[in-house]
Image (cartoon, rainbow, N blue to C red):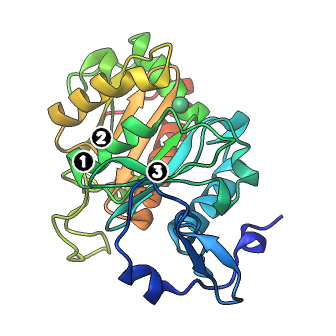
Amino acid sequence: MAASDHISEPVQMEAHASRKRRTTDISDTLQNGSGQVISEADALIHSPDPLHPANHICELCKNFYTFGWVTGTGGGVSIRDDKHIFIAPSGVQKELMRPTDMFVMEYETKKYLRRPAVLKPSACTPLFLAAFTKRDAGCCIHTHSQWAVLVTLICEAGLQDHPDGSGKDVFAISEIEQIKGISRGGHGNSSTEILEGGRKAGNLGYYDTLKIPIIENTAREEDLTDTLEKAIEEWPEATAVLVRRHGVYVWGKDVAQAKTQCESLDYLFQLAVEMHKMGLNWVK
Ligand SMILES: [Zn+2]
């Protein structure tokens, strides 16, 4: 069933905006365009706009499922707008998700404004929050891509050690065109200028070496928070963190940038695995 099948008529947003939001009281009600009464919490996830975060996350997850990024309920996506964070729940079939499954948190207070009663919040939540608070990201994507897992295994085995890399804890690759899809400075806000050849001035160039830190996996996803936050601080240029034997977290200033970077990185991870099988070095 398409995510749009679940989108109700527009709610009266003027009325919504004029009311002072209360963080935990979801008994407040509003009327949607059909005169149907819905709670203030539900108004946060009802919109006819396909780019509204609640709708957009469902669409992204449906697409990412076909890439093998979020199969078996793994992985996830979170989007931050001005005041809210929208998060896909834990343990749901990501390709079948609906806007009504969405958790919504107030960014300033980190309190949930909307919690679906029958679902659990994502264990990725503190990791998404790290990207939002430490990098001012607008979107964070977590995949369980096999290519991401495989490059961490190749690094762990020390099979691609290179002076320009840093041993088993860093994935490094150079002189591959797709590197230009990755921003410098971790969030890409540095520049929107377009250089000759079409790449953004704020993105890596062909002759730059892309480096992504690798952190060790933990038994529980939320226990990754401390090491992920440390990696974000120690690698101010990084736009992603690989998790050994697990997957990758990728962020961007908005959905478009996070998605572009996640796709570019997955392309590079797959290429790296194939290069390794052919006995080729990742860093020239
Ligand atoms: Zn995960």
| First along the sequence among labels 3 and 1 | 1
Q: CA distance from mark 2 to mark 1?
A: 5 Å
List x then y, in percent, for residue 202.
Answer: 20, 63
Horizontal side of 255 relative to 167 (left or right) equals right
Residue 133 image label: 1
Asked if the beta carbon under badge 2 is closer than 8 A to the nearest atom of ligand 1, the reply is no
Camera sees residue 236: yes
Q: Position of residue 272 (x, y in %)?
A: 48, 35
Callout 3 secondary element:
helix
> Distance of mark 2 from mark 3, alpha carbons?
17 Å
Q: Are marks 2 and 1 in contact (CB under 8 Å)?
A: yes
Q: Residues within 10 Å of mark 1 (few under 14, many from 20)?
A: few
Amino acid type at mark 1: Thr
Badge 2 marks a residue whose secondary structure is helix
Front position among marks 2 and 3: 2
Q: Relative to residue 206, is residue 123 depicted above or below?
A: above
Question: Identity of the amino acid at label 3?
Answer: Cys
Q: What residue is shown with label 3?
A: 262
Q: Which mark is residue 130?
A: 2
Q: Residue furthest top?
A: 157
Residue at 54 percent across and 25 percent down: it is 150
- Front-most of 120 and 215? 120
Q: Secondary structure at mark 1?
A: helix
As drawn, 92 above or below 59:
above
Mark-to-mark CA distance, 3 and 1: 19 Å
Classify mark 3: residues with Cα within 10 Å, few (<14), some (14-19) or many (20+).
many
Residue type, numbered disc 2: Ala
Query: Does label 2 or label 3 sit earlier along the sequence?
Result: 2
Q: Would residue 174 be seen by someone viewing this image from the given angle?
A: no
